[in-house]
Image (tube, rainbow, N blue to C red):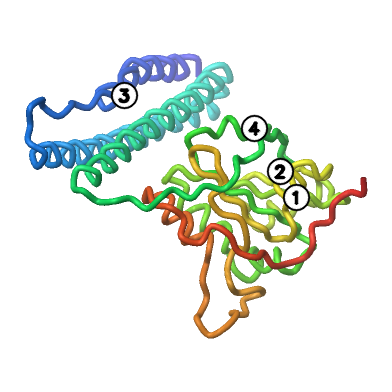
Amino acid sequence: MRRTATIATIGLVLLLATSAGLGQRSERPARPGRGQAPAGQREGMERLAQRLQQQIDELKAAHEGLIAELRAIHESAVKEKATGTAEKVETLISKRQKTFQRRVSRLQQQQQRLRRAVRGQAGQTARPQRRGRKAPEFQSTSFDGEKVRLSEQKGKIVVLEWFNFECPFSRYHYEKASTMADLAGKYKDKGVVWFAVNSTSHTTTTANREFAKKHKVPYPILDDTSGKVGRAYAARTTPHIIIIDKEGYIAYNGAIDTAPLGQVKGDAGKINYVDKALGELTSDQNVSTPATSPYGCSVKYASR
């Protein structure tokens, strides 16, 4: 057993050496040559944007391969009861995941800047930016004990979903449909993070944990039984969706869609406002419908 654990440790060291330089090359893309004509500059920037995408894809593939190998070593160490090695590998996996996310985020930001520059060079006139108010800073803890600060999500698009599993309008999107989980999954790799917020004053940790486990909720449910976060954002109903853009402004405020309990309002068909807004934001566009009227049960705030 001791010999096998030693082999796992050697493998860990080799992986550390191999992965030390992952993504370094892609953080410094080449710049367009000086003295190019405008058309040449556009072509150069377009090529750079394509090269950045290729580097992002390569970085993701290398990262996934590395994490798979580390997880295999971790499983081996656990089976062999090599506790120290298993803990080191688990710590390393966590560090590599965070480093990877930072590098990909930087590359994606560079790519977006290039694309904006290309549009500017082509003479396209961007629509005036319509901003909502600055999103209030908050700190909260999930019912699983995870601490969350809005300021730590800088550079990401943040979705806040006011949630109450006692409300049939909220339950519909987990029991009859998987609206919220599907959207969170759809945009997870596009720089979007999702948090459910339960501002119900009488809710309990156990009940929220059981609901999350039963319905496989893939994101944290934040404990806002004090109502502090909900009141800061003027959350009215469950569900009520707030989307915060990468610069920290409220880009969308309102309903999840036009179909309470699955019943479509009007004759135009179902519109998922949140899907539409996230699609626009992740494509570097302004949100075409920044506010709607939310539907659902009233938020059950604690009395002041």
Question: Does the CB distance between marks 1 and 2 fall below 8 Å?
Answer: yes
Q: Residues within 10 Å of mark 3 (few under 14, many from 20)?
A: some
Q: Classify mark 2: residues with Cα within 10 Å, few (<14), some (14-19) or many (20+).
A: many
Q: Residue at x 53, y 22 (%)?
A: 91
Q: Residue at x 37, y 30 (%)?
A: 106
Q: Secondary structure at mark 2?
A: strand
Q: Are marks 2 and 4 in contact (CB under 8 Å)?
A: no
Residue located beneath label 2 in the image: 222
Mark toward the start of the polypeptide (4 vs 3): 3
Task: State the mark number for residue 198.
Answer: 1
- Which numbered mark, 2 or 4, is in the foreground of this view? 4
Q: What percent of the width, then of the height, locates residue 266?
A: 57, 83
Q: Earlier in the sequence, mark 3 or mark 2?
A: 3
Inter-mark Cα distance, 1 to 4? 16 Å
User: Going 56% across and 45% down the picture, which residue do you hit?
Assistant: 244
Q: Which residue is mark 4?
A: 149
Q: Amino acid at mark 3?
A: Leu
Where does residue 235 sit, x and y in percent of width and height?
A: 72, 53
Q: Quadrant of residue 140?
A: top right
Give the amino acid at mark 1.
Asn
Q: Residues within 10 Å of mark 1 (few under 14, many from 20)?
A: many
Q: Give the residue number, with chain letter if any, for mark 3.
A: 22
Cβ atoms at labels 1 and 3 below 8 Å apart: no
**What is the x, y in percent for residue 135?**
62, 41
